[in-house]
Image: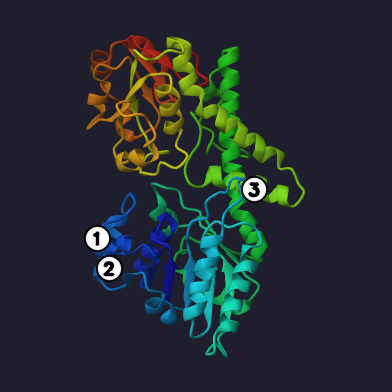
Amino acid sequence: MNISIIGTGYVGLVSGTCFSEMGNHVWCIDIDQNKIENLKNGKIPIYEPGLEEMVLRNHENGRLDFTSDYAEAIPSSDICFIAVGTPPGEDGSADIQYVLAAAESIAKHMVGYTIVVDKSTVPVGTSEKVRAAIRRVLDERTDSLGIEFDVVSNPEFLKEGVAINDFMKPDRVVIGTDNARAEAIMRQLYEQFTMNEHPIICTDIKSAEIIKYAANAMLATRISFMNEIALLCDKVGGDVRAVRRGIGTDSRIGMSFLHASCGYGGSCFPKDVKELMSVGKRNGLEMKIATAVEDVNNRQKLLLSDRVVQKYGEDLSEKTFALWGLSFKPETDDMREAPSITVVTELTKRGAKIKAYDPEAYEMAKRYLAYIPAGAISYEPDMWSALNGADALILVTEWKQFRSPDFGKVKGLLKEPVIFDGRNQYDPKQMKAEGIELHCIGRGLV
């Protein structure tokens, strides 16, 4: 098939590249001319394992093209995916102005039957607005007689760090449509990805729009629930990892998304929980669980800095902390809503200095932490230089290289053998044997 993807961000670039990998011809469209030129020259704007090689291969083979000109791509496209950003507004609601602008641009260049797909995470009812925007533009055209289109909701369920595998071997594909013709074409497109016999779920458009928010809010709920249980364990002397095993082995519950931590971040969970709260409010319904999930996560992001203050006091002007991990999760450079932002902000405003190391997120971190006073944070070339001369280590992101470091070397580089473990990565018994004071979450203090 001939496909256009509007937006070359995380979802758009991964989706377009994976479609081209299956033999489709894909145009990736972005109004950022600089980004398009970089993509043509093999420069990838995001870090995602395996993506660069796949982009280069399909671009060289002529299946994946990049343009900022809608007129170059839309007329020959059977399906146009909208994968632009929907950032949250001040009230938490998703801003769909870029979605509607993309829909209007598609409508200006359509020449035959076209399926327009909402791939962006959009509020319930967005498809109706997209349909109206396209119809309005077509009505204004003098050459639109006979041009037909359908609007489909096709939410994405990609996990950063394993996005290519998620797209190529999806747990499920959700297609929201009210038209049999569109459903048949979308099924044909996705059947090549569902050889694992996982389902293609076809439903009405509004249900498809809700599914995305409900899925992410459910996963965020599990994280926040376990984080609250971890705080209880700290109060009463339990071990949250034992609790996780005790409840996760229940087949009705399962083990996924039950790790206690310093909070979730990223582009999806925080934004989607906020939008779920917002859409409830717009419809006269208080989403109490989603609100609690958000509150718990905001509190959890303060946990590491609070524990540092508990140990060292409010005045941290004489303290320097090594920080391992800046991105919101490993295998990505994404800094959106990352817990590290809260940690760095809270500690530097008390006078602390931060020596940070992350394998991939330096450039993103410099953008997201640009407001931090000059000299308050340094970006170190490796994990060991971050430790050198620091008063304590703070682990924020669980990159694999942090899992089993040389603890003798850690002790030798730190002024004091103290670790604040925001991911419960280190075993308290081992740390006690190593002579390291460990502050973890829900497992007690060594």
- The 10 Å Cα crowd at callout 3, few under 14, some 14 to 19, many 20 or more, is many
Q: Is residue 136 left or right of residue 338?
A: right
Q: CA distance from mark 3 to mark 1?
A: 37 Å
Quadrant assignment for the N terminus: bottom left
- Judge whether 366 appears above or below 152 on screen: above
Q: Quadrant of residue 436?
A: top left
Identify which amino acid the numbered label 2 is placed on.
His
Looking at the rendered structure, the secondary structure element under dot 2 is helix
Q: Who is closer to the viewer here, 169 or 211?
A: 211
x and y percentages locating residue 294 in the rendered image: 60, 36
x and y percentages locating residue 147 in the rendered image: 55, 86
Looking at the rendered structure, the secondary structure element under dot 1 is loop
Q: Residue furthest right?
A: 284
Q: CA distance from mark 2 to mark 3?
A: 38 Å
Circles 2 and 3, Cβ within 8 Å, touching? The answer is: no
Looking at the rendered structure, the secondary structure element under dot 3 is helix
Identify which amino acid the numbered label 3 is placed on.
Leu
Mark number, residue 68: none
Q: Earlier in the sequence, mark 3 or mark 1?
A: 1
Q: Which residue is mark 1?
A: 42
Residue found 25% across the figure and 71% down from its top = 61
- Is residue 1 in view from this perspective? no
- Is residue 405 in view from this perspective? yes
Q: CA distance from mark 1 to mark 2?
A: 9 Å
Mark number, residue 276: 3
Q: Quadrant of residue 381?
A: top left
Q: Who is closer to the viewer here, 359 or 110?
A: 110
Q: Who is closer to the viewer here, 205 or 104?
A: 104
- Judge whether 240 appears above or below 150 on screen: above
Q: Which residue is mark 2?
A: 59
